[in-house]
Amino acid sequence: MSCIAEQKQVFVGIAHPFYWKPKLRIPDIYENEANKRAFGQFLQACLTATKEEQLLREIILLDQKKIKGLGPAVASILYFLHPTLIPPFNTAIVNGFNKLFGENIKLGSWKEYLRMRELILQVNNKFRPHLSTDLGAIGGLLFDIGDMKILATGQQAIATEDILKIERQLAKRHKEVMDEQLEDNLHTEMQYHLLKVGRALGYDVSCASNDKSKKFQDDAFSFLCMGTIPDLGIDKETQTTIGLIDVLWFEKHTNKVAAAFEVEKSTSIYSGILRLTDLHYSLGHHVTSLYLIVPDNREKEVRLQLSRPSIRSSSASFHYILFSELRTHCDAICKFGVDKGSLVKIASSLDF
């Protein structure tokens, strides 16, 4: 961090969120464990991101947490990770931007930063032969204008139409990220309920191998699940695919799958049905209960998919449970349920 901060005056203060500064006293960063983890996870996600949409999604999600002291100054750190996608940001750069474009961008707001970024990218693309694909070049130009080292004359205000277009783009992207986050949260909640019920009914439980790092209400999935699913006596590729099913229940201390669950959200319900069908035919010697967990507003769609001739003619038998039913009855099934048959009371199928 010192190496970054010492490169040029434009990056002075970049280390601010990382160091203890008693006079500043920002407990949101230094003393809140959840915020520390959130910031660390944000940086990790940005480090491994390969697409612009991933970076913007992480910025929007960090902004939702309202952590004091972790505003757009953090963009200067991201610039070093993705110099062609994220421009640096500080007071002088904002001042230079406002002077050059007749704007009134405010400090401390990720929303304002993202609006500024959109225009910087447009201008940088237009004048790339004179600038660089590295956004540090235009960032340095704006810094020098803001620091009065370059006098910007003949500025032209951004057309209202362009401003409205940018704001519509940002609002659309923000809504998409929030909707996706809501879906992810619901997906995680439903997986948690299934893991909780399965354990309460006496089964060994497992979530998808790529979901082991998830948690719900401070309950980490890694503490609820088996470390790995048992060897099912099938080829390695099929074993790996089955390990990606959202939730599996196993008969205690065996490799026998008692029940399998696919939690659906915006993805095609048919794809979840196919995964469970593959499981059924791969483990034909097991008696397996197959469940789709679906949002209430997609019940009509799941019934339509289950009525397809290819599904009806198979030997696989499917049930589905609505999100609201699982959420409402989770604790009761944990307390009074006997075995996997208890789920049938809150489930539906085309045979009912």
Image (spheres, rainbow, N blue to C red):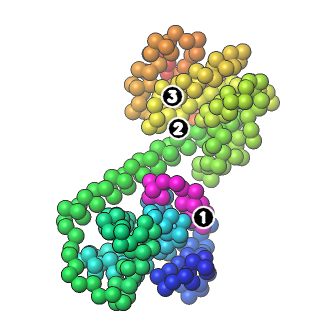
The residue located at (34%, 84%) in the rendering is 145
Residue 26, image x and y in percent? 54, 78
Residue 238 lies left or right of residue 39; in this view the side is right
**Tag shown at residue 327:** 2
Disc 3 residue type? Ser
Residue 55, image x and y in percent? 48, 58
Q: Which residues are magenta?
A: 36-57
Separation of marks 2 and 1 at Cα, in angstroms: 31 Å
Residue 273, image x and y in percent? 53, 24
Disc 1 residue type? Gly
81 vs 226: above or below: below
- The crowd level at tag 3 (other Cα within 10 Å; few <14, some 14-19, many 20+) is few
Magenta-highlighted stretch: main secondary structure? helix
Question: Circle 1 is placed at which residue position?
Answer: 40
Disc 2 residue type? Arg
Separation of marks 2 and 3 at Cα, in angstroms: 24 Å
**Tag shown at residue 271:** 3
The residue located at (53%, 84%) in the rendering is 24
**Tag shown at residue 317:** none
**Label 3 close to label 1 by CB (< 8 Å):** no
Quadrant in which the N terminus appears: bottom right
Residue 223 lies left or right of residue 36; in this view the side is right
Q: Earlier in the sequence, mark 3 or mark 1?
A: 1
Separation of marks 3 and 1 at Cα, in angstroms: 34 Å
Residue 282, image x and y in percent? 67, 20
